[in-house]
Image (cartoon, rainbow, N blue to C red):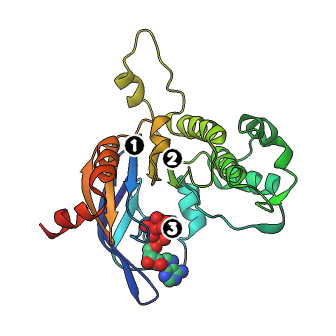
Amino acid sequence: MLKIEDLHVNIGEKEVLKGINLHIAEGETFILFGPNGSGKTTLLMTLMGFGNYTITGGRILFKGHDITYAPIHERARLGLGMSFQRPPTIHGLKTRHLVEMCALHGKNGTVPVDELAERVNFTNFLERDINAGFSGGEIKRSELLQLMAQSPDLVLFDEPESGVDLENMVLIGKTARKLLDGFVVPHPEKSMKELKSGRKTSGLIITHTGYILDYINADRGQVMYNGHLCCEARPRDILEHVGKYGYQECVRCLTK
Ligand SMILES: Nc1ncnc2c1ncn2[C@@H]1O[C@H](COP(=O)(O)OP(=O)(O)OP(=O)(O)O)[C@@H](O)[C@H]1O
C-alpha cells in the first residue's frame, strides 16, 4: 500500500527527516511513537503533500504510484486521507460543505452527510464554521467525519487522543476502528486472521499515550527519533519499553 524509500525532508534549511524507510501493507496498521520534535508530524504532512516540507531525497510510492511530488488532491483521489493534530479554523465555510468536499475527493462521490454525522454525534455542528470554537474532542470528531466521507485506503492519524476526554475517546477509538477494520466483525465460522485478510484499509497513527491501542488492531510500530526510524516492535511492547526506560534508550539503537 505504502512504500517510503530513503526519504529526506527539510523544513527551510533544517533537515528534519534523515532517510526514512517504511513499508505498510494493505490492511495493516502501523503505530509511530517518538519524542516531541522528532519528525512524526513532518512525515505525515510530507506524505499528504503539504508545501512547507521540501523533499531533498528518496521517494514515496502509494499503491504502486510514485506520489513523491504529486499534489494533495491527487493523493486524496488515490486514497490517502489525514486527520490533523491541530487543524485550522476556517471562517465562512460550513462543516457540512467540507464533509461534502471530502466525499467528492474520495471514492464515494456523495455521502449521506447527516447519517454519517449522527454516527459521531456531530449533527449539531454541521452548520457551524469549520473548527470555529470547537473543543478538542469536537475537532477530532469533525476530522473523523471528514475521513468517513472520504473513505481513504490509507488513513494518517496525527495524535487521535490529543485534547480528548475519556468519554470522547471511546467514540473516537471505536470510530477509528470502524474506519480501519471496515466490516470486520466476529464470525462463528471464520478466524480473525481470515476476516482480517479481507480488510483493505491501512493506517499510520501517531500516538504519545497509546490510548488508541485499546480500540484498534495495531500490527507493527516504530519509534521516530531525531528524524530516523528505529526500534521496530509490537506497539504495546514499544509503549511498555518507553514507559520503563524512556526514549533515551533509542539513542543506543541508532548508534549501533
Ligand atoms: N513550519 C516550521 N518551521 C520551522 N520548523 C518547523 C516547522 N514545523 C516543524 N518544525 C520543526 O521540525 C521538527 C519536527 O517537528 P514535528 O512537528 O514533525 O515533530 P513531532 O515529532 O510531530 O513532534 P510532537 O510530538 O511534539 O508533535 C521540530 O524541531 C519542529 O520545531
Q: Nearer the viewer, residue 26 or 127?
A: 127
Side of 135 relative to 85 (left or right): right
Q: Position of residue 135 (x, y in %)?
A: 73, 55
* Front disc: 1 or 3: 3
Q: Is mark 3 within 8 Å of ligand 1?
A: yes
Q: Label 1 belongs to which residue?
A: 26
Q: Quadrant of the C terminus?
A: bottom left
Q: Would you say the beta carbon of the disc 2 residue lies within 8 angstroms of ligand 1?
A: no
- Horizontally, residue 177 falls left or right of residue 232, namely right
Contact between labelled residues 2 and 3, with CB atoms less than 8 Å apart: no
- Amino acid type shown at disc 2: Asp
Q: Are marks 1 and 2 in contact (CB under 8 Å)?
A: yes
Amino acid beneath label 1: Glu
Task: Give the residue at x 45% y 33%.
Answer: 199
SS at badge 3: helix
Decide if residue 92 is on the left or right side of residue 12.
right
Q: Using the numbered discs, state the Cα–Cα distance from disc 3 to disc 2 in whole angstroms.
A: 17 Å
Q: Position of residue 157 (x, y in %)?
A: 52, 53
Tell me if I can see residue 195 in this picture. yes
- Which residue corresponds to mark 3? 45
